[in-house]
Image: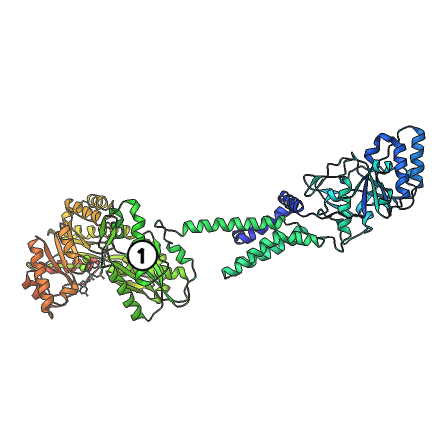
């Protein structure tokens, strides 16, 4: 039921049914028919003539008697006495009138109207003339059902008064006494102004020949028979007009009310068709037919004698249209990014053409650029990047999410072609961006999803995740592997799993020794996080740290590591020798405003001298706000923490980093270290880096030492500290502690 109510279509139907049942939109139907009959008018049949008795009222009953005699002698086809006669208490005149009435033949019908001004409702009172006047001649009743503002709508074929059934006047006029339904609907296209009216006085004066009445249905109508009943398209009209319009309707072969429900069903079917239609053209056709169904169709049907009130159908269409317009508006708002470009949601909700790849580009240092630019240029910045992408790849639509991601679709070329195409696009970003007076060097990283057939939203997210990874790893393009889709639920619930892992000890810290090359002793350790998942087994830190960053759990993890590492450092320091503990700080956290406060708070609470803690930082482009990062690190250093530049030589701008950041230590990346034995070039790079670091007053740590030869070379080059599998693997603390205790007794470097 709730699902149904969320659909604009079913909601519209439900409300329209309620509307139909309560008559809420009756004013709409009224307005519709009134407008229709204002413009749709036909001449009244000339076979029915109305003689206005009112204009001889001054002649009293004697005048009426003369008129009746005159009309009778003119041989009308039928005579309808739609008038209350004035028996004016002058007995001789009244006697004349009675005689005149007596002389009338069987083609005479006495017409009576409700005392209550023509309105026909159950409790209406009718006054039937006495039998001495009627004398076995027919009696007809003019009785109408009207709408909420007294416009006549329909009439019954007969009315029962005091146990006797009397036909209604229109049925007498037309000779049609029954139909498929109990009510009939007058034809208001009959223009009341064209009904032939003859003045009674003109007849009596002889100005109008009585022959004009011969063979006609003559209605003797008293004027002043004011009726508050109204006639569609006109308003108040002469009472006989309703009965004539009724007679015209009855003389048609059909007079059936299809009911507003039939219209509603038709319109609903059309809306249903349009709403579900796949193509714009079909939608157009369906919705145009809805307009036809609610506007001209009821008129056409009425012309054929089929009555169809369009108000419930109109209501349904209006509700549906309003909801759709509202939904579209919301969608437009939701689907536009601040730059005015369509956003990722718009792409995610679209249906992708067959044979296309989804590409997301992540722009390096985007937030930094925005921080430099005045607000009014932010949109321009995004649009300029989008234009450059569009020029490079020929895409017509570039989607933008506010975090510096741009997405589009590419024709699915063979992979090597696609990669070189994107490389070409990347080259376009070698030229700096010029936004207002500002110039920016930038770089762009791509995430590519080639999983045809998967839901669009999933593909966009995959490409987005890959673009983030490319950016984080400094790679040009990252391809989203299909098998990772299976990982999605795992990645999404990581938040809770990390908390659980911390609680039950599945997440723990390993310690890898750092040896002082000069003294041949372990002088410190690097704390490295480990996760032994109960079902997945050990998970590599690189894998889940990235996920933890995305899941917003990296803060909690980092502070937990710091706390655990302090516990370990204090245990070793208690043995008497100075011991240095290194912890890793994620690039994502370096610029966080509360980082320094939290580090200081933990160190103070745990009562450790910050000089005993080394914070290792890797330069990556995930580092959002560079200025804030440098500020934080400088402050940490001022608090006493040692700073180490991790993985030196692999980051995006290591030298620049070295210049910006007052650091105490430089860690040579193991990719360099591993190659110094075999490669003269790498050896030269490492040697000169050591020289450079020393010149800047930094300690040099070589990580990833896997053999004695490497260690020997590093010692020759003057490297200060050594770390690697050759010297000791990352171990649980208890194992590490034993190793530490034994290290003074062992020959350097022998594990
Ligand atoms: P890293 O900071 O560069 O850590 C050194 C990595 O090199 C560790 O990998 C270590 O096990 C490995 N390693 C040490 N000696 C050798 C060797 O001789 N040969 C080889 N092949 N590898 C060696 P691990 O533990 O897999 O950690 C990988 C990365 O995960 C770390 O790189 C660090 O960036 C990150 N990480 C680990 N723990 C944490 C943490 O608590 N917080 C944060 N933010 N990052 C962490
Ligand atoms: Mg490290
Ligand atoms: Mg490292």
Give the image location of residue 95, x and y in percent. 94, 33
State which image quarter holds ligand 3: bottom left
Q: In which quarter of the image is residue 748?
A: bottom left
Above or below, 68 relative to 315: above
Q: Quadrant of the C terminus?
A: bottom left
Of residue 354 and residue 198, the one placed in the foreground of this image is: 198
Give the image location of residue 81, x and y in percent. 85, 40
Residue pointed to by mark 1: 387
Give the image location of residue 527, x and y in percent. 20, 56
Seen at 10% across and 67% down, the residue is 681
Above or below, 616 relative to 35: below
User: Residue furthest toward the top?
Assistant: 90
Category of crowding for the residue at label 1, using alpha-carbon neighbours closer than 10 angstroms: few (below 14), some (14–19), many (at least 20): some
Of residue 647 and residue 173, the one placed in the foreground of this image is: 173
Left or right, 564 with reference to 256: left
Of residue 3 and residue 362, the one placed in the foreground of this image is: 362
**Mark 1 vs ligand 1: CB below 8 Å:** no
Left or right, 183 with reference to 526: right
Left or right, 728 with reference to 490: left
Above or below, 667 relative to 322: below
Instruction: Evaluate whether residue 688 shows in this view.
Output: yes
Of residue 303 and residue 23, the one placed in the foreground of this image is: 303
């Amino acid at each position: 039921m709730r699902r149904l109510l969320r659909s604009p279509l079913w909601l519209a139907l439900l409300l329209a049914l309620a509307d139909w049942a309560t008559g809420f939109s009756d004013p709409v139907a009224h307005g519709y028919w009134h407008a229709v009959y204002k413009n749709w008018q036909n001449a009244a049949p000339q076979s029915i003539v109305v003689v206005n008795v009112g204009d001889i009222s001054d002649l009293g009953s004697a005048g009426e008697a003369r008129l009746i005699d005159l009309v009778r002698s003119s041989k009308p086809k039928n005579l309808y006495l739609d008038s209350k006669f004035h028996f004016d208490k002058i007995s001789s005149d009244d006697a004349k009138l009675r005689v005149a009435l007596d002389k009338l033949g069987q083609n005479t019908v006495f017409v009576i109207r409700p005392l209550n001004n023509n309105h026909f409702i159950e409790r209406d009172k009718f006054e039937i003339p006495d039998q001495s006047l009627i004398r076995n001649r027919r009696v007809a009743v003019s009785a109408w059902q009207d709408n909420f503002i007294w416009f006549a709508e329909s009439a019954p074929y007969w009315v029962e008064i005091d146990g006797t059934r009397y036909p209604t006047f229109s049925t007498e006029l037309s000779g049609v006494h029954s139909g498929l339904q109990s009510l009939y609907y007058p034809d208001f296209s009959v223009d009341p102004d064209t009904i032939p009216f003859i003045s009674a006085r003109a007849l009596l004066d002889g100005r109008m020949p009585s022959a004009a009445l011969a063979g006609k249905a003559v209605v003797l109508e008293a004027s002043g028979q004011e009726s508050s009943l109204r006639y569609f398209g006109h308003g108040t009209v002469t009472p006989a007009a309703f009965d004539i319009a009724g007679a015209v309707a009855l003389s048609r072969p059909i007079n059936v009310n299809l009911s507003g429900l039939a219209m509603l069903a038709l319109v609903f079917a059309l809306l249903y068709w349009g709403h579900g239609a796949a193509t714009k053209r079909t939608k157009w056709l369906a919705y145009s037919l809805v307009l036809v169904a609610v506007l001209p169709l009821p008129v056409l049907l009425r012309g054929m004698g089929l009555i169809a009130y369009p108000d419930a159908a109109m209501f349904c269409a209006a509700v549906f249209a309003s909801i759709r317009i509202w939904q579209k508006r919301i969608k437009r708002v939701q689907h536009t990014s601040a730059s005015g470009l369509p956003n990722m949601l718009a792409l995610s909700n679209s249906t992708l053409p067959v044979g296309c790849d989804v590409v997301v580009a992540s722009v390096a240092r985007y937030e930094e650029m925005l921080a430099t630019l005045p607000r009014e240029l932010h949109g321009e910045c995004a649009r300029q990047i989008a234009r450059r992408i569009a020029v490079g790849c020929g895409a017509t639509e570039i989607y933008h999410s506010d975090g510096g991601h741009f997405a589009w679709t590419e024709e699915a070329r063979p992979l090597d072609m696609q990669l070189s195409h994107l490389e070409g696009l990347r080259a376009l970003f070698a030229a700096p961006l010029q936004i207002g007076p500002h110039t920016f060097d930038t770089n762009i990283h791509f995430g590519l999803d080639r999983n045809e057939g998967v839901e669009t939203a999933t593909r966009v997210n995959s490409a987005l995740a890959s673009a983030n990874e490319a950016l984080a790893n400094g790679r040009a393009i990252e391809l989203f592997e299909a098998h990772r889709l299976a990982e999605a639920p795992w990645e999404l619930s990581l938040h809770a799993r990390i908390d659980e892992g911390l609680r039950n000890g599945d997440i723990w810290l390993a310690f890898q020794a750092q040896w002082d090359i000069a003294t041949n002793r372990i002088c410190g350790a690097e704390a490295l996080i480990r996760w032994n998942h109960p079902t997945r087994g050990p998970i590599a830190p690189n894998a889940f740290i990235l996920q933890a960053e995305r899941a917003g759990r990296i803060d909690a993890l980092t502070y937990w590591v710091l706390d655990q590492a302090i516990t370990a450092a204090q245990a070793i320091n208690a043995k008497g020798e100075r011991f240095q503990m290194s912890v890793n700080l994620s690039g994502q956290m370096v610029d966080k405003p509360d980082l320094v406060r939290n580090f200081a708070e933990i160190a103070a609470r745990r009562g450790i001298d910050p000089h005993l803690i080394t914070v290792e930082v890797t330069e990556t482009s995930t580092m959002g706000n560079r200025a804030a990062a440098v500020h934080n690190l400088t402050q940490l250093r001022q608090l006493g923490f040692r700073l180490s530049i991790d993985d030196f030589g692999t980051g995006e701008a290591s030298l620049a980093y070295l210049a910006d950041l007052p650091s105490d230590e430089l860690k040579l990346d193991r990719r360099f270290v591993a190659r110094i034995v075999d490669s003269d070039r790498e050896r030269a790079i490492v040697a000169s880096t050591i020289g450079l670091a020393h010149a800047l007053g930094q300690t040099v740590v070589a990580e990833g030492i896997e053999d004695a030869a490497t260690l020997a070379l590093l010692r020759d080059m003057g490297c200060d500290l050594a770390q690697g599998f050759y010297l000791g693997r990352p171990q649980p603390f208890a194992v590490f502690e034993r190793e530490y205790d034994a290290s003074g007794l062992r020959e350097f470097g022998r594990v």
